[in-house]
Structures are given as C-alpha cells and as structure tokens.
C-alpha cells in the first residue's frame, strides 16, 4: 500500500531514478511509479529494511546527491549499500549515492520505507523545492565526492524519525537476545523475550519458530506459531518443512512440500536430505532431477547419500558431473574410498583437493585407522597439528583408537596430556575414548581412575568401562558396575548387554549370563541382536555345554555368521569333540571358504588327537583354496619403541640375550613343576623338537625381552595377533611367580593378567570340566563405590609352593 504526500518530482530526478531502476521498472511519465519502482528495487536487493533517504545539493559543483541509510533487521549493527549508476557496491561505511543533475539549490527529499511484513510497503515521500533545470554537465563521481558534501543527518531527521530508529534498535537487540538464548538451548528465556516485544519483524517470528521446530514434541506449538506469522517467506516454510521431517518422517514431509506456495533451493535440499538419511536414493535422485535450480549443497547431499548406502559407482558419477565440487563433496568421496578399502585413491583425492577443512583431515585419519593402517593415521595427525589445525573430539577419538590398535600406550598418554592442556579435557567423547585406549593397552587401573574423574558420564562411558572389566576377566566387577549404572538411572542399550554377556562369558558365570540374556526384552525392552546370540553360544561352549550351544544355533532367528561356528569349533578343540568339530568346520567354510580360522582350528583338533592324516588333508584344502595361515606374532613396547617377535624369530638383534634368559627360566620352571604342553604344536616331529618349537613361540620371546629391559615396577604388557596357546599361558603363570612380575597378555579374545603364578581368567579357557577357580586378586582404587570389591584368592598355597621351589 503506497501513500504519496506532496509529490513534485523534477524531470532530472525522474531520469536518474530510471537509470538506477534499469529494467526493473518501465520508463513512464508517471513520476510516482518511477519512485515506487526504485524503492521496490531497493527492497528486493536489501529485503525487510527500513531507512531514510536524505538529499542535498552540492554548493561547490552544483550536483545533486541522494543518500539512503539502511538498517537491516538481521545484522548486528547498521549496514549500508552504495549504488552508483544502478550497480550495488559494498563499501566500509556503505551509503546509497545517486548523483543527480541540478543547480546550486538545496532541496530536501525525505522518505521513510517501512517493510514490516513481507512486501506490504508503506511509503511516505515529501519534496520541498521546485524542479531544478536540467544540467548537461558531467556527473560527480562518488569516489571524488568529499565528506563536506554529505548532509549532516541530525539536521535532516525529524524527532519522529529518531524515535523510529530507537524502536528499530530495540527490535534488533531483542532479536539478538532470542538468538543467544536459542544457541544456549534456553528456549523458555527466548520465548519470554519474544512475548515482551511490542514490535516484531519477520526475523523475530522465524527465530522463535525455529526454536519450536527443533523439538519434535513441540510440533503443535510450532504449527500454531507458524499460522500466526502475518506474512511468511521461504524461510518460514523451510523451517516448518524441517519440523515435519523431524517429527513425521519423509513421506508426510513430501506431502507438505508439494503444498508449499513458496519454495527455494533450500526447500528442495531439505527434502532430498530426508530421503538420503532414510536410504531412499531412488526417490532422492528423482527429486534431484526435478529441481529447477541446484547448488553445491544439492550435489553434496546426493554424493554423500550414495556413499552411505554403499553405491560408490553412482557417487563417483555424481561427483564427476558436479559443476561445483564443495569440500563436503570431496570429503564424502574420500570417506567412500576409505570405506571400500581404496586407500590409495582416497590419498590421491586428498592431495588434489583445492581446500580442506577439519572434517576432511578427520576422514583420512579415521580411514587409515579403519583400514588397519593406524601408524599412517597417527603420522597424518602429526602433520595436521604442524599446519596449526586444532583437533576436535572426533579427531582425538580416531587417534586414540589408532593408539589402541597399535597398543601404543606411551603415545596414547601423550595424547592424554594434550587434551589436559586444551579445552577438550572435559569433553565426554574424548574422555570415553581415553578410557577405551587405556584398558585396550592393558592399563585398566588408569582407565578406572579416568572414569571416576569424568565430570559427566553417558551410556557410552559406562559401556566402555564395563567392557574394560569384562575383557580383562574381572566379570564380577563388571556386573557390579552394571548394577551401579542402573541405580544411577541410566538405561542400558544393546552394547551394554554385549559387555555384560562377555563379562559372564570370561568369568564362567553361565547362570547369570542366561538370566541377563532372558531379561533383555522382558525387563529392558532391548532388542536381541546377533551379537548377543554369539556371546551366548560362546558362554555355553566355554562351559562345555556343546549340545545346548548347537541347539541355540539351530534356533537362531538370524542367519548365523562365521564367528558363531568359529566359536563352536574352538570349543570342540578344547573338549576334543571331533564329530562336532567337523560339523562346525564344514558350516564355517560353507559360509566363508577363505576363512583361515576354520582350517587352522580343524587342523589343531586333528593334531591334538594324533590324526596327522587329517592335518595333511586340511593343509591340502588350504593350498587348493589359496588360503594362507596368518603368521603369529607378538609385540611389546619398551621406551616408546615397539619390538615385534615372530615364532622362531631369527631377526631381532637381542635374540642371544633373550634365549639366554629363556634357558634360565625353563630350568627354574621345570623345578617348579612346569611340563610343556606338546599338543600345542601341529608338527609331526619328536617331542624334543616340539619343546624347542614351543620355546620359540612369539609371546615367550616378548615376555623374556620385557623381563630383561623393563624395570621391576613396570608391568610387562605383551600383545598378540592370535589367541595365546595353552603352553604359553601355563608358562606365563610360572614366570610371573618365579620373577615376581606382573605380566599382561592381550590376545584376540581377552586380556590375561598373570601375577603370583595365577591368571585373571582362572584357567577357565583351558579347564576341560568347565569349572572355574577365581585366583586373581584385584582391588579397586580407594575412595570409590566399588572399594573392597575383589576376586577370591583360591590358590594361595599353590603360589607359596611354587615360590619356595
């Protein structure tokens, strides 16, 4: 709605305004249309604005100039726009200058542009001089127009204009207050500011609408707020579109999208992202093709979606076709190549990228770690720090996982020191990653200490600590911690129950494991997954209940994976059940003919029963199927250097010293009652040769090296890529008693803490009867809720006899 007061427009002014408006308004003799078109042109360029146009003649050159001071509603401070000849140009203190022909008169043109809702514009114009004659002289350039020619605003603005400006400043400040409250997740305070505002702009309405829309339970309130907005723009509709998507899913959102009267590229991108998150790439591609206009966000969403659903070929096609490749698209492709194990291609993309952000670095570091190339990931992390890029919690989670995979405890401690000096020390994600790193590197005590120091513990933190105790064989401690978590009101998830069942598994708590398994759905409404069934099969197998384990496998609601039959096969070796072993091996190799575990375990069973013909048959099958046995090796960290040993190692430079130590140990072990377990070698050779082969096992070499190189106060931490054999397990117990040292061995199954001639597993892994004797003492740190919780020392007399010998 337009209201024009005392409008007498000079011809020169009309001509110049026509030039500024250019194609936006047809040139016409109706002066009011030209001026209104000019202002609409400004409104389109600087939407939802409010300002004052001030004009004055130039006394020195006789030129006429106009200034428009615009204050945008969505900026922190007044901003201005300069216009010369119709072209918008940003300046430091931007003012709209229209240089007009005119004599040395001093006319004054003043208007107020009110744009409260959408495009309802109220315009007031007053003109206080006669038409100046046309002047054919050249125009004054805005760059040569001195500040002396600029009219002083206080002399030209009326008291009502000053009042309007103050009201506008109040609205801007209120809008900023609402934004601050919403960023701080303080919606109630934002709503109080909103309700106290007498004047509200479209930004005000959209801001409070976005606050409602972020809460799915507030959908009805968001809908009512949306309906109250006097004039809605594309932003308003996009906020509601995102609200529908968050509350009802993509199908209902599509129906709302089709009814939207105003759509922009963000509207299309929102719906495409909804289809992508749901994995419906067909519908996403259909919508993408129908888009009238695409931007880099549209292409990036499609590329990321195809990567997530595993369609790398389509992702590559979209990436190559994208006219503008954003850093998001490059990073998505790197993720895709890393996900499919194409590390070299991902490295090439990383080098060719025109620009990188922290997410890109994180993707490459995480890709290295996930592809068992943690050492390269840690080197890249060091390079990233050298470039001055500060890591975030995601970066440190990948780095700490790399330290865990390498068992690099000292490097992990350095990362811990870095977090203490940075602002990430109180981050829950970083704290949880540190807990996992410590216990995976064999330092359970420091993991527990860090857990107690965490300012906030979420379900992931509790799961990490429970898993740590479970993997270290302290099942009763893990279950006590689980009950403590429940008492604090934290609901367990499916990962929690995996940790609980593993704790029962490694401690021989069969009945408790069965009760926890049965209570998952009944008491906690946690869906039973294949991982839980795998734990139950392992629990029954370790307890010697092989028939019950087979019955459970046959009743599985899922198709069993190879790990379940591998567990059954390993139990058959311990319990010497050849018939069931052949069934398990056949089932395992039918699922995965290249699974080396099936061949090796079956060959072990044949060897344990002196069925050397069966061993030869298995080896022939391996050769036919081109299956190569993974060589066993162990490693130990000494003074931040990792030393690796293989069975029968002939390379390490300290071998003479190691063998000398082993020979001395064997003599003492034999006096203490040690007898080599010859069943742990697959070779059909004489017993004396078998003993020499057993003596050369990688874990024995690593333990001997640790005894020589590490001080008495430091535990010997050895890591192995395969499961520790029965003979090395027995030898480690004797060595711990003879040397008075704590020895920690991590294999593919669990941690073994050897101390005073006993192991934390209580020999459960090697006890054929399935019974367990808890012989490892462990006491929690002082001042904790678990103080005094420990395992019973049930073999004190045996330890004393070994030490006296």
Image: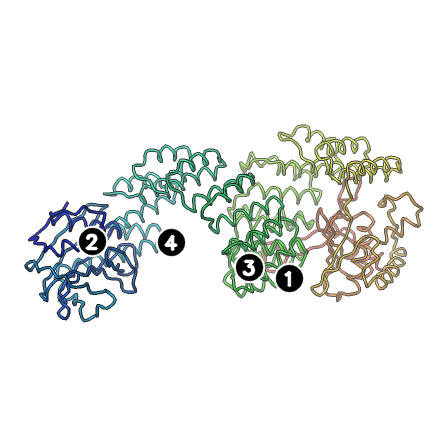
Q: Earlier in the sequence, mark 3 or mark 4?
A: 4
Q: Earlier in the sequence, mark 3 or mark 1?
A: 1
Is residue 15 something that shows in the picture? yes
Between disc 3 and disc 4, the foreground one is 4
Disc 3 target residue: 453
Residue shown at 66% from the left, 45% from the top: 503
Q: Earlier in the sequence, mark 3 or mark 2?
A: 2
- Tag 4, which secondary structure? helix
Q: Where does the image place residue 748, in percent across and percent down from the top left?
A: 71, 47
Q: CA distance from mark 1 to mark 4?
A: 36 Å
Disc 1 target residue: 411
**Crowd rating for badge 2 (residues with CA inside 10 Å; few <14, some 14–19, many 20+):** some
Query: Quadrant of the rendered structure where residue 385 is?
Result: bottom right
Between disc 3 and disc 2, the foreground one is 2
Contact? badges 3 and 2 (CB < 8 Å)? no
Quick one: 353 or 138, which is closer to the camera?
138
Q: CA distance from mark 3 to mark 4?
A: 28 Å
**Crowd rating for badge 3 (residues with CA inside 10 Å; few <14, some 14–19, many 20+):** few
Disc 2 target residue: 19
Disc 4 target residue: 183
Say above or below: 691 vs 269: below
The tally of labels here is 4
């Amino acid at each position: 709605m337009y209201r024009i007061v005392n409008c007498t427009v000079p011809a020169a002014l009309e001509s110049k305004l026509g030039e500024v408006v250019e194609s936006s308004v047809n040139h016409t003799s109706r002066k009011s249309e030209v001026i209104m078109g000019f202002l609409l042109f400004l409104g389109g360029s600087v939407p939802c604005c409010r300002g004052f146009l001030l004009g004055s003649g130039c006394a020195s050159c006789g030129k006429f100039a106009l200034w428009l001071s615009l204050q945008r509603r969505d900026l922190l401070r007044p901003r201005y726009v300069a216009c010369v000849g119709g072209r918008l140009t940003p300046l430091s203190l931007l003012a709209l200058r229209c240089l007009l022909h005119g004599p040395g008169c001093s006319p004054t043109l003043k208007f107020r542009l009110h744009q409260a809702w959408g495009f309802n514009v109220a315009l007031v114009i007053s003109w206080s001089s006669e038409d100046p004659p046309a002047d054919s002289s050249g125009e004054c350039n805005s760059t040569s127009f001195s500040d002396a020619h600029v009219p002083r605003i206080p002399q030209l603005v009326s008291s009502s204009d000053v009042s309007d400006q103050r009201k506008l400043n109040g609205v801007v400040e209120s809008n900023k207050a609402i934004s601050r409250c919403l960023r701080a997740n303080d919606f109630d305070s934002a709503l109080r500011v909103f309700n106290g505002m007498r004047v509200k702009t479209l930004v005000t309405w959209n801001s409070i609408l976005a606050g409602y829309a972020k809460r799915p339970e507030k959908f009805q309130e968001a809908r009512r707020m949306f309906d109250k907005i006097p004039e809605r723009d594309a932003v308003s509709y996009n906020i509601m579109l995102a609200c529908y998507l968050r509350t009802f899913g993509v199908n209902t959102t599509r129906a709302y999208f089709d009814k939207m009267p105003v759509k922009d590229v963000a509207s299309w991108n929102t719906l495409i992202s909804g289809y992508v998150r749901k994995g419906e790439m067909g519908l996403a591609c259909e919508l993408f093709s129908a888009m009238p206009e695409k931007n880099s966000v549209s292409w990036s969403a499609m590329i990321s979606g195809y990567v997530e659903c595993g369609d790398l070929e389509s992702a590559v096609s979209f990436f190559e076709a994208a006219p503008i490749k954003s850093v998001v698209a490059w990073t998505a492709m790197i993720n895709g190549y890393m996900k499919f194990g194409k590390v070299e291609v991902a490295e090439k993309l990383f080098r060719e990228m025109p620009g990188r952000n922290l997410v890109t670095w994180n993707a490459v570091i995480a890709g290295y770690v996930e592809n068992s190339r943690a050492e390269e990931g840690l080197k890249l992390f060091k390079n990233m720090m050298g470039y001055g890029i500060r890591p975030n919690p995601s970066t440190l989670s990948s780095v700490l996982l790399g330290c865990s995979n390498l068992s690099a405890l000292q490097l992990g401690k350095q990362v811990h020191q870095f977090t203490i000096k940075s602002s990430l020390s109180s981050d829950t994600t970083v704290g949880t990653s540190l807990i996992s790193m410590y216990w995976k590197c064999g330092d359970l005590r420091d993991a527990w200490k860090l857990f107690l120091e965490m300012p906030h513990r979420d379900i992931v933190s509790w799961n990490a600590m429970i898993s740590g105790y479970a993997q270290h064989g302290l099942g009763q401690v893990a279950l006590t911690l689980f009950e403590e978590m429940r008492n604090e009101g934290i609901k367990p998830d499916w990962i929690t129950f995996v940790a609980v069942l593993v704790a029962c598994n490694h401690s021989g708590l069969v009945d408790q494991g069965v009760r926890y398994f049965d209570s998952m759905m009944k008491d906690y409404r946690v869906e039973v997954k294949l991982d839980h069934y795998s734990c139950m099969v392992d629990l029954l197998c370790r307890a010697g209940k092989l028939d019950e384990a087979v019955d459970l496998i046959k009743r599985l609601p899922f198709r069993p994976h190879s790990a379940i039959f591998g567990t059954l096969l390993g139990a058959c070796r311990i319990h010497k059940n050849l018939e069931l072993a052949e069934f398990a091996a056949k089932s395992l190799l039918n699922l995965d003919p290249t699974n080396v575990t099936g061949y090796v375990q079956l060959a072990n069973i044949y060897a344990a029963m002196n069925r050397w013909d069966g061993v030869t048959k298995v080896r022939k099958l391996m050769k036919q199927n081109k299956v190569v046995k993974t060589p066993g090796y162990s490693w130990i960290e000494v003074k931040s250097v990792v030393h690796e040993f293989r069975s029968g190692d002939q390379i390490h430079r300290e071998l003479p010293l190691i063998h000398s130590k082993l020979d001395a140990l064997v003599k003492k072990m034999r006096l203490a009652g040690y007898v080599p377990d010859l069943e742990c070698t697959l070779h059909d050779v004489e017993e004396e040769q078998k003993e020499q082969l057993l003596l050369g096992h990688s874990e024995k070499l690593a333990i001997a090296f640790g005894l020589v190189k590490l001080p008495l106060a430091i535990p010997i931490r050895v890591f192995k890529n395969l499961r520790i054999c029965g003979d090395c397990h027995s030898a480690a117990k004797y060595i711990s008693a003879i040397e008075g040292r704590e020895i920690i061995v991590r294999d593919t199954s669990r941690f073994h803490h050897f101390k005073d001639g006993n192991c934390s597993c209580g020999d459960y892994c090697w006890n054929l009867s399935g019974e367990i004797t808890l012989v490892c003492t462990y006491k929690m740190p002082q001042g904790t809720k678990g103080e005094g919780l420990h395992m019973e020392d049930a073999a004190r007399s045996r330890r004393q006899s070994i030490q006296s010998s």
